Amino acid sequence: MKLSDFDFDLPEALIATRPASPRSSARLLVAEGDRITDAHVYDLPGWLRPGDRLVLNDTRVIPARLTGQRVRQGEAGETRAGIEVTLLEPQPGGRWAALVKPLRKLNEGEVVEFAAGLSAVCVEKAEGQAVLEFNLAGEDFDAALNEAGAMPLPPYIEAKRKADAQDKTDYQTVWARNPGAVAAPTASLHFDAPLLEALRDKGVNFTHVTLHVGAGTFLPVKVEDVTTHRMHAEWGEVSEEAAAEIAATKAAGGRVIPVGTTALRLIETAARETGQIAPWQGETDIFIYPGFVFRVTDALMTNFHLPKSTLLMLVSALMGRERMLRVYEHAVAERYRFFSYGDASLLVPGD
């Protein structure tokens, strides 16, 4: 299975830099087996059935991108220089693994000062990352980070514009509650209160799980034999309640439909051991590509993904590679908007 098998031509003009407003006005491509229908996200209740269960990732994106100054003490006195930091994951003792630009100019022991009274010491550099120890912890750290930080927009948006105050709302789901992600579960960004109410009225059920999406979700695949690619690990949890709800839906003949590839990867991880959904907590590096046997997922709502990406491989595993490439060919021809702030698809494999 070659990386080139998952390539397609994508005009740059189709990469969305702002979301649709209101959220549920985004377009929705519905692929049921070989049939493709053009709709909108607010039409979703018409495509679902009473008893279906949507699985929602309730992770909360932290404003992980910080701009500051590194402070160096020397014989000539204090010198300062600009630096950019993207927090990756917390570590014990108030420390964070982080990406730093420029990393080569930051020395161990140097202080980096940010806004809102937030500062950090570089305690380690390894494998292209730094470990920073912050001066604040707990609620004080959260408050300062919220004031000083910006949303960590994906690289393909960041290259076109910087994050702003609007992104703190736009790049967060309406049900976000467990902070820890540095990227949004973007299919979930299409849901607003009226849509959720309409789905409840239809008899659709909801289950919340947590997967803290990491910056590794944007890393490119660099090997031609995709089966040798190693996924980054992300922390997640399927609670006892969530597992019971999903199992009950399966037993009753309802469909389990994760909203987003993050929710899908998590529930499939939780079903690997026995073949059935079970409570689970830990780090998952599950890699889903064609040939994968789905234990829980009956359909998927997701955005449109990068060429040659692991996420395109995942949807190809669900729908079939050739069918998925036809879906993407249609999406490009009909000028759907791509990636994190783009439009959505509802993928139903069929028989």
Image: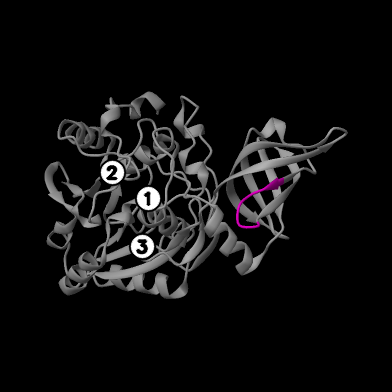
Give the number of the disc on residue 342: 2
Mark 2: few, some, or many residues within 10 Å (few <14, many ≥20)? many
Give the number of the disc on residue 200: none
Q: Earlier in the sequence, mark 1 or mark 2?
A: 1
Identify the amino acid type marked 2: Gly
Q: Main secondary structure of the magenta part?
A: loop
Tell me, yes or no, if residue 237 can be seen here: no
Question: Residue 123 at x, y = what percent?
Answer: 77, 46
Residue extent of the magenta highlight: 112-117
Of the pair 228 and 185, the residue shown nearer to us: 185
Left or right of residue 205: residue 280: right
Q: Residue furthest front?
A: 76
Q: Is residue 326 above or below residue 199?
A: above
Instruction: Evaluate if marks 2 and 3 touch, with contact meaning CB atoms under 8 Å apart.
Output: no
Q: Earlier in the sequence, mark 3 or mark 1?
A: 3
Residue that numbered label 1 is attached to? 261
